[in-house]
Amino acid sequence: QVQLVQAGGGSVQAGGSLMLSCAAYGYEHSWYTMAWFRQAPGKEPEGVAVIDPNDRTIYAASVEGRFTCSKDHANNILYLQLNSLKPEDTAIYYCAAEPRTIKRDWYKQNQYKHWGQGNQVTVAS
């Protein structure tokens, strides 16, 4: 059974950094597309970053240059490093996984079968 278990997040001042992790159980990263989404209060979910089975990444314009998505293949863990955080980055962050390569529609929630439990990130101004 596939399970995604998230850790990390918390509260920081604007300009600070945080790291999120997403440990995957029940499958190998190597043939899954994995992504990060976030949802702020009163807003629609937003695709933040995706990493495909070949470790190619795409980022939302709102986080490009500030966030970095990576994988630890040996331990089956997905990471999201969040730098230069802004108050508008405040949201619940979710990891997601899908057992195929997703390209054009990576930012759509309905493309992913498996989800983590979510972690709160709060950025104070």
Image (cartoon, rainbow, N blue to C red):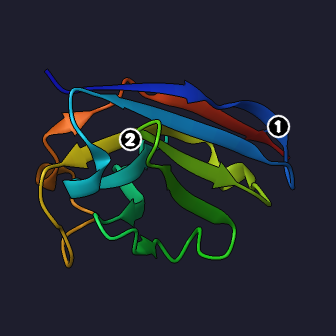
Q: Amino acid at mark 2?
A: Cys
Residue 29 point in image, percent of width and height: 30, 47
Does 56 appear above or below 114? below
Comparing 50 with 125, the one in front is 50
Query: Residue visible at 21% across and 26% down?
Result: 26
Q: Between marks 1 and 2, how big is the CA–CA gap?
A: 20 Å
Instruction: Report whether residue 125 is seen.
Output: yes
**Picture disc at residue 95:** 2
Residue matched to label 1: 12
Residue 27 point in image, percent of width and height: 21, 35
Residue 8 is left or right of residue 28, and the answer is right
Query: Residue visible at 43% across and 72% down?
Result: 57
**Neighbours of disc 2 within 10 Å: few (<14), some (14-19), many (20+):** many
Q: Nearer the viewer, mark 1 or mark 2?
A: 2
Comparing 10 with 79, the one in front is 79
- Image quarter where the N terminus lies is top left
**Neighbours of disc 1 within 10 Å: few (<14), some (14-19), many (20+):** some
Q: Secondary structure at mark 1?
A: strand
Does 28 appear above or below 84? above
Residue 96 is left or right of residue 65, and the answer is left
Instruction: Classify residue 11 by image quadrant.
Output: top right
Instruction: Report whether residue 41 is seen.
Output: no
Q: Secondary structure at mark 2?
A: strand
Query: Residue visible at 40% across and 39% down?
Result: 76
Instruction: Classify residue 2 by image quadrant.
Output: top left
